[in-house]
Image: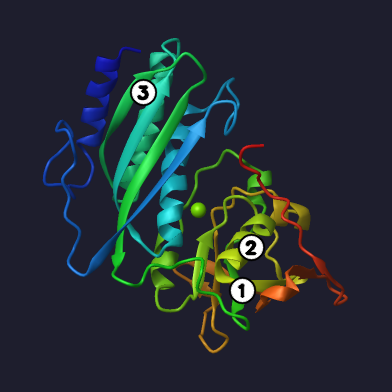
Amino acid sequence: MQERALIASIRHMAGHGPSALRVSIGDDCAVWRPGTGREIIVTTDQLAEGVHYPAANAPARLLGARLVGRGLSDIAAMGGEPRLAFLNVAWPTALPERWCLDFLRGFAAETRRWKTAWAGGDVSSISGPAVASITVIGEVPAGQALLRSGARPGDLLYVSGRLGAAALRNMRRITPRLALGQALRGRATACMDLSDGLSTDLHHLCKESGVGAVVEAPRIPVASTLDRALNWGEDYELLFTARPNTRIPTRLADVTITCIGRCTRRASGVRIEDADGRCGPLEPRGWQHLG
Ligand SMILES: [Mg+2]
């Protein structure tokens, strides 16, 4: 598809989003002013053909929507509100026009769904497989962003929703837990979204916080099998910690919340306990970036 035709389509689709901008697409930069007393949060993510989805028969519209969902899930993990989304694509010229437009439609519809302005991006051709990347800018009340580093020994460990569902239906739309993340401001001590699998992501959180953890296997809200819940990834639920005296309801922002364990001293490592109370190391067996 021709670059000029693509850009014209993007301007048209992006023009129907929320008007969080002083200047719309067409200038060299997007101009945007966050509210007073707010901090800006930024995240970026990408989808590569052959890595994140198979080349053959890839559902374009769903992929465009999923790219938005992945970006917004990071904003949710920080307790933020998404404001602007930017899309960069590098597409082979042989990619059918219909596929490209469907991808853009999926992207546009999903940004509208989550009240995020599609504020710009870049289009180029590539001689290799297709790549698309999103950048999302959001905001959060100053000092209230949920970090991975705030957990302390004794904090309880929670997850939202059910884990391992992606193993049943990998190519589904992502529901970023935006309302939940915002509801956790002032309650959670640490938070992150589950993209690589609980076993791997819990190690990330523990490392950033300088704690260990014990997960009680029977408590994990499993969508299919325990192995998938621990290691499959692509859940896009939130993993968070809270002080033991902080009340965390079993349902928050329309999502089920489950306590799955607790944080310990760092020296105890990251462990998992079975129904009989036997405890062993929880190895990070989720998604490995860069092979
Ligand atoms: Mg993340």
- Earlier in the chain: of badge 1 and badge 2, it is 1
Q: Residues within 10 Å of mark 3 (few under 14, many from 20)?
A: some
In the image, 147 versus 134, the foreground residue is 147
Q: Which of these two is toward me, 108 or 272?
A: 272
Residue 157 is tagged as 1
Amino acid at circle 1: Leu
Q: Kindly identify which residue carries mark 3.
A: 101
In the rendered image, the residue lying farthest to the left is: 22
Count of marks overlaid on the render: 3
As helix, strand or loop, the secondary structure at mark 3 comes to helix
Identify the residue under disc 2: 202
CA distance separating discs 1 and 2: 10 Å
Query: Do the CB atoms of the residues marked 1 and 2 lie less than 8 Å apart?
Result: yes
Secondary structure under badge 2? helix
Whether residue 254 is visible, yes or no, is yes
Amino acid on which disc 2 is placed: Leu
CA distance separating discs 2 and 3: 38 Å
Question: Vertically, is 167 above or below 180?
Answer: above
Near mark 1 (Cα within 10 A), the count class, few <14, some 14-19 or many ≥20, is many
Quadrant occupied by the N terminus = top left
Q: Residue at x 33, y 44 (%)?
A: 111
* Between discs 2 and 3, the one toward the N terminus: 3
Q: Is the residue 154 above or below the residue 17 in the image?
A: below
